[in-house]
Amino acid sequence: MSRRSLVVGNWKMHGSRPANAALLDGILQARPFTCDVAVCVPFPYLSETAVTLAGSDLRWGAQDCSVHEQGAYTGEVSAGMLAEFGCRYVIVGHSERRALHAESDQQVADKAKAALAKGVTPIVCVGETLAQREAGQTEAVVKRQLSAVIHTLTHCAGEMVVAYEPVWAIGTGLSATPEQAQAVHALLRAQLRAATPHADGMKILYGGSVKPDNASVLFSMPDIDGGLIGGAALKAADFVSICRAARL
Ligand code: PEP
């Protein structure tokens, strides 16, 4: 089945108003793309990003959301608020949040559910640490992480985007080989097939040190439907060249 590729920039906690303007302008100038393209920006920049990208085919989103709709949760941002700013996507369960904020599989699943309830597509990140890979636990870890989301979303599971991000490859310059990544993507696809009739149309992105020079070989693998890009999403030329490497 052919799936339209998606390339998403995860800006993490980077940026400034002038730097963002230059970066977005560089991406806008490079259109058209043959894949879907989105940027997930820090919360304070959502409003300006929405204004800059409005009317273009570029999409935008955030990097986290609350499990709650509203209330006394200082510092939290709800999915409904993201929807108000036109967010198409929200990243949930990024390994930095799992590690630095102790987010559990169930919290990640609840965030994905909160996002879908407001019409925002969750990009659910799964991935093993180096120690887990070396202990032969990759399959068990990613399946456990995805399973929590599948069971929480039930009949809506087909609406999420999944991102396989091996923790050891994030920000390290050590990308998974295309074969290593494809092997995990294939087992995630199989798990999705057992859960939803929409699995073959779902996007499974790869993330972890994707750069202009390794993007096309990664994106040529049958179950890799695009990328979640960190460091290389901060330079327009690199991000654009990764977007150009995506298959149709
Ligand atoms: C990420 O943070 O999601 C990521 C993949 O980062 P990088 O591309 O820098 O490895």
Image (cartoon, rainbow, N blue to C red):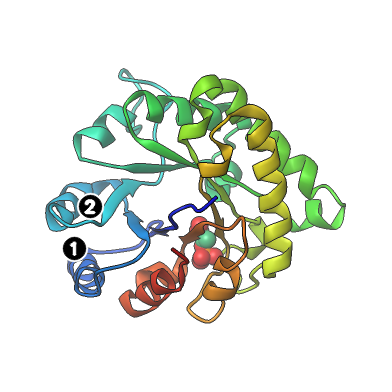
Judged left or right of residue 91, residue 133 is: right
Q: Nearer the viewer, residue 209 or 193?
A: 193
Amino acid type of the residue tagged 2 in the rendering: Tyr
| Looking at the image, residue 98 lies above or below residue 60 | above
Mark sitting earlier along the chain (1/2): 1
> Where's residue 88, x and y in %?
31, 42
Residue located at (87% from left, 52% from top): 135
Q: Is mark 2 within 8 Å of ligand 1?
A: no
> Where's residue 94, x and y in %?
53, 47
Residue 129: mark in rendering: none
Q: Marks 1 and 2: CB-CB under 8 Å? A: yes
Q: Nearer the viewer, residue 30 or 220?
A: 220
- The residues tagged by marks 1 and 2 sit, at their Cα atoms, a distance apart of 8 Å
Mark 1, residue position: 17
Q: How many marks?
A: 2
| Looking at the image, residue 104 lies above or below residue 28 | above
Image quarter of the C terminus: bottom left
> Where's residue 148, x and y in %?
63, 28
Q: Which element type, helix, strand or loop, lies under badge 1? A: helix
Q: Residues within 10 Å of mark 2 (few under 14, many from 20)?
A: some
Residue 45: mark in rendering: 2
Residue most extreme to the front: 1
Residue located at (64% from left, 70% from top): 175
Residue located at (66% from left, 30% from top): 147
Q: Residue 102's quadrant in the figure?
A: top right
Q: Which element type, helix, strand or loop, lies under badge 2? A: helix
